[in-house]
Amino acid sequence: MTDTRVELVVTVPEELPRDLLVPTAMRTTLGVLVELIAESRNRVVLASPFLQLASLCRGPLGLALGTAVARGVLIDVVSMGGSMMGLDTVAPTQQRLPITVRVSQSRPNLMDSGAMGSHAKFCLVDGDAAYIGSANFTANGLTKHFELGTLVRGRPAADLWSVVSRLFAEGFFVPRGWLRIVPQE
């Protein structure tokens, strides 16, 4: 296991200057998510109570997901039922690398659509690294809102991996099926 490292991550609204983060050590949420997925070897868990298909399959994030799936990486997406219904209704038009992801939702939300069950927003990769932050995986969360998060490596990521694995094993996160999405430019 690598040494513990923590970095600050931020989403900066599009209308702000592009060089806003230059004098800092902060990195962008989207850039960190792409990096994490690109370095994945076995499994990625993306969790966000609100997500949009277009945000997952557009541009560099979609390319990273498609490439990871092509390498045999299992992509788990955990969200609320309402967000997953939206996934089925979007029909991407441009053919690129198809991505098959396993979609899951929390048991409380599955039993009562008014119950959130999980408000956590994270991207966990192989138990080695994790983004944990405030950004939902939506266009607004990744490009328009001011959002804060952290990139952790080492023991904190391994600890989160252990908890999330137990949440799946104990049936708190319930797999609902598989979704095929196609990345867009």
Image (tube, rainbow, N blue to C red):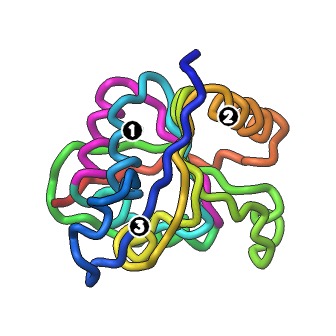
Q: CA distance from mark 3 to mark 2?
A: 22 Å
Residue nearer the viewer, 155 or 110 = 155
Mark 1 or mark 3, which is nearer the start of the sequence? 3
Q: Is residue 67 magenta?
A: yes
Q: Which mark is residue 156?
A: 2
Label 3: few (<14), some or many (≥20) within 10 Å?
Answer: many
Q: Quadrant of the C terminus?
A: bottom left
Disc marking residue 37: 1
Real-space Cα separation, disc 3 to disc 1, in angstroms:
18 Å
Magenta part of the chain: 60-80
Residue at x 61% of width, y 53% of height: 78
Residue 73, image x and y in percent? 42, 28
Classify 143 as above or below 107.
below
Q: Which callout, 1 or 2, points at the residue further toward the start of the chain? A: 1
Q: Nearer the viewer, residue 130 or 23?
A: 23
Under circle 1, the secondary element is helix
Residue 14 in view, yes or no: yes
Q: Which residue is mark 3?
A: 11
Which percent across, then down, holds residue 150? 54, 51
Is residue 132 left or right of 72 when viewed as pictured?
right
Secondary element at tag 2: helix
Residue displayed at 34% across by 40% down: 35
Amino acid type for the residue under numbered disc 1 = Ile
Let me know if residue 127 appears in the view. Answer: no
Quadrant location, the N terminus: top right
Instruction: State left or right for residue 88 relative to residue 185.
Output: right
| Residue projecting furthest to the top | 1
Distance between mark 1 and mark 2 Cα atoms: 18 Å
